[in-house]
Amino acid sequence: MSDKILIVDDDHNICEILEFNLVSEGYHVECVYSAEEALKKLSSRHALILLDVMMGGMSGYKMAEKLRNNKNQIPIIFLTAKDTENDMLTGFSVGGDDYISKPFSIKEVIARIKAIIKRTKPAEKKEKTVEPTKKIVFKNIVINLESKELLIHENRVVLTKTEFELLTFLAKNPDKMLSRENIIDVVWSETPFVAKRTVDVHVARLKKKMGEYASVIASHSGYGYKFIINEIKL
């Protein structure tokens, strides 16, 4: 069954171009022309949203923020003419998974869609083998590698797939300085054209969700990030 993509853009011409090319790639595509319409149309069958930022009525940023506040983690790629660094950071801060400026290359859009869907699609279920639950445990922080959950003081912290993979990579290399390039190679290995600033934004979001334990992830300007065990309180 082909993956289903929801295109949200008030420019009908852009919708037609994207729909034609994505259908040619084997995707099932739906187009809507406002965020309000998208929220009504969106279902669990959709694998990804291509979302314009500037639309009449609700903006793309507001729609993404609304979805994330409702714990909906469907991947979102922003398509927008707003291409400053602050615009990009806003897109990531409200829960976007990627950000592509207009005018865009159709090949680049397709490459990013394929990478994000592949990275976020649940793994196929395999026959279970009897083995102990795999966890990374640092005092009150428990990273369950099987259930893909972060527990702090036994309370579940909701992370996106990218945030969980980022935390896991850092935690598997405690007290080791990891460069942004190294992090991109591991966490975004299948996603093309990832900027170093993307790492910073995702780390900031992860630290915010970790609350009192945010300091376990330390940044060093010009070098990268480190998971510091001594910062974990009893």
Image (cartoon, rainbow, N blue to C red):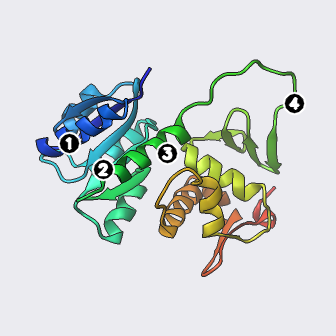
Q: Sequence order check: which comes first, mark 1 or mark 4?
A: 1
Q: Earlier in the sequence, mark 3 or mark 4?
A: 3
| Secondary element at tag 3 | helix
Q: Give above or below for 180 relative to 74.
A: below
Query: Where in the figure is residue 24, as x and y percent of width and height?
Result: 31, 33
Question: How far is disc 1 from disc 4 in space, using C-alphas?
Answer: 50 Å
Residue that appears at 83% across and 21% down: 129
Residue that numbered label 4 is attached to: 132
In contact (CB < 8 Å): disc 3 and disc 4: no
**Direction from residue 140 to residue 1 in the image, left or right:** left
Quadrant that contains the N terminus: top left
From the viewer's perspective, is residue 161 above or below residue 104? above
Q: Which residue appears at 52% of the width and 58% of the height?
A: 202
Q: Give x and y (percent) for residue 95.
A: 42, 49
Give the Cα distance between marks 4 and 2: 45 Å
Q: Secondary structure at mark 1?
A: helix
Which label number is shown at residue 115? 3
Secondary element at tag 2: helix
Report the residue marked by disc 2.
106
Task: Report the Cα–Cα distance between label 3 and label 4.
Answer: 31 Å
Secondary structure category for the residue under label 4: loop
Q: Which residue is mark 1?
A: 17
The answer to whether residue 85 shows anywhere in this view is: yes
**Sequence-first disc among 3 and 1:** 1
Image depth: mark 3 or mark 4 in front: 3
Side (left or right) of 44 relative to 120: left
Q: Are dots 2 and 1 in contact, CB under 8 Å?
A: yes
